[in-house]
């Protein structure tokens, strides 16, 4: 799939490809400001529509508690679906149980395989 646009913001690379999925590659220490900057760009790329978002945090070192809260709040407002990549199967399983319990206002699921994550987003 061809990349239509790529933007760098607050240590994150954000791209949109021909399939309409916005991909966020998170690096380093994630702050509330960083999440807010990323969502400004997501809103711009999605033209204000609820977006399908794939997040690869495998180069992320840490995330501030306020950044997590901001991610949830902005996700509920601007996401149709969010697929998050993880390297560890046990983390995926635990997180998916927690997500089911918390019942967020948008579709969110963790994956260990990128192609499965993208297929899931396309099914929404």
Image: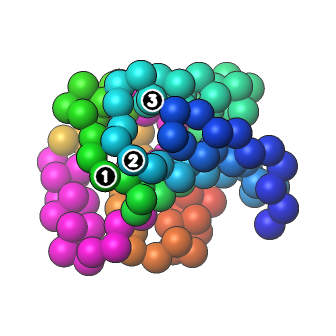
Which mark, residue 28? 2
Which residue: 52% across, 33% down?
A: 10
Q: Nearer the viewer, residue 121 or 36?
A: 36
Horizontal arrangement in the rendering, residue 19 relative to residue 67 (left or right): right
Mark number displayed over residue 61: 1
Residue 106 spot, x, y in % from top left: 41, 39
Q: Is residue 76 left or right of residue 10?
A: left
Residue shown at 35% from the left, 66% from the top: 86
Decide: marks 2, 1 in contact (CB < 8 A)? yes
From the image, tell me which residue sits under label 3: 34
Of the 4 image quadrants, the one containing the N terminus is bottom right
Q: Quadrant of the C terminus?
A: bottom right
Q: Label 2 vs label 3: CA separation?
A: 11 Å
Badge 2 crowding class, 10 Å Cα cut-off, few under 14, some 14 to 19, many 20 or more, is: some
Q: Is residue 83 left or right of residue 31?
A: right
Q: Is residue 85 above or below residue 53?
A: below
Q: Is residue 30 above or below residue 115?
A: above
* Other residues around mark 3 within 10 Å, as few (<14) / some (14–19) / many (≥20): some
What residue is drawn where x is 41% and y is 22%? 33
Give the image location of residue 12, x and y in percent: 54, 43
Q: Earlier in the sequence, mark 2 or mark 1?
A: 2
Dominant secondary-structure state across the stretch colored magenta: helix
The part of the image, by quadrant, that contains residue 34 is top left
Q: Is residue 74 magenta?
A: yes
Mark pair 3, 1: CA separation: 14 Å
Q: Which residues make up the magenta segment?
A: 72-101
Residue 75, horizontal then vertical, whole percent: 43, 33
């Amino acid at each position: 799939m061809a990349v239509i646009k790529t933007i760098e913001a607050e240590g994150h690379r954000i791209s949109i490809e021909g399939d309409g999925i916005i991909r966020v590659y998170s690096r380093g220490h994630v702050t509330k400001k960083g999440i807010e900057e990323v969502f400004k760009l997501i809103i711009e790329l999605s033209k204000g529509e609820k977006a399908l978002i794939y997040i690869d945090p495998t180069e992320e070192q840490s995330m501030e508690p306020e950044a997590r809260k901001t991610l949830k709040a902005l996700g509920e407002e601007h996401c149709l679906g969010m697929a998050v990549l993880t390297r560890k199967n046990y983390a995926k399983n635990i997180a998916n149980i927690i997500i089911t319990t918390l019942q967020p206002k948008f579709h969110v699921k963790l994956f260990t395989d990128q192609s499965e994550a993208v297929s899931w987003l396309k099914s929404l």
